[in-house]
Amino acid sequence: MVYAGWVSSEALVGQAGKHIRPKVLFSFGVSGAIQHTAALADARFIVAVNKNPNATMMQLADVALVADANQVCSGIIRALKQRIRD
Ligand SMILES: Cc1cc2nc3c(=O)[nH]c(=O)nc-3n(C[C@H](O)[C@H](O)[C@H](O)COP(=O)(O)OP(=O)(O)OC[C@H]3O[C@@H](n4cnc5c(N)ncnc54)[C@H](O)[C@@H]3O)c2cc1C
């Protein structure tokens, strides 16, 4: 998203960006290049969504979902909106 210009470079996670220590990391459509995953070593629990089951990120994840990230994101947003309404 940083390289596509969707968000500022301050959001970059990895060798050239931030080192993070989340309790849960949701990783959508990320291949798992070493320059990115180097900054994730302290993530406690990783959920990865990728169309490619062989992506490195899928091997690193605690939960790996082979799916279209756009569809999964849309579903999560729908479910959250429903919760807010209820
Ligand atoms: C010196 C140097 C420093 C760098 N520093 C950093 C850094 O700090 N942080 C960083 O992140 N990168 C860094 N990089 C870049 C890094 O090498 C990779 O190019 C980058 O991390 C790849 O990002 P990506 O996995 O999002 O994209 P891609 O490599 O393009 O992978 C996209 C992934 O998404 C999957 N996918 C595509 N569409 C969908 C969909 N609709 N649904 C589900 N899955 C989908 C594909 O199967 C693929 O696995 C650096 C590179 C260099 C040379």
Image (cartoon, rainbow, N blue to C red):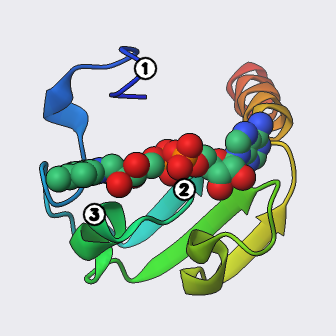
Badge 2 crowding class, 10 Å Cα cut-off, few under 14, some 14 to 19, many 20 or more, is: some
Between disc 1 and disc 2, the foreground one is 1
Q: Nearer the viewer, residue 20 or 52?
A: 52
Q: Nearer the viewer, residue 86 or 59?
A: 59
Instruction: Establish if 43 lies above or below 72.
Output: below
Q: Position of residue 61 (x, y in %)?
A: 59, 80
Instruction: Establish if 58 lies above or below 4.
Output: below
Q: Amino acid at mark 3?
A: Gln
Displayed quadrant of residue 52: bottom right
Q: Amino acid at mark 1?
A: Ala
- Say left or right for 24 vs 75: left
- Say left or right for 10 vs 57: left
Q: Are marks 1 and 2 in contact (CB under 8 Å)?
A: no
Q: Dividing the image into 4 quarters, which one contains the N terminus?
A: top left
* Label 2 SS: strand
Q: Residue at x 66, y 74 (%)?
A: 58
Of labels 1 and 2, earlier in sequence is 1
Q: Position of residue 9 (x, y in %)?
A: 18, 28
Q: Residue at x 84, y 35 (%)?
A: 75
Residue corresponding to mark 2? 27
* Label 3 SS: helix
Residue corresponding to mark 1? 4
Residue corresponding to mark 3? 35
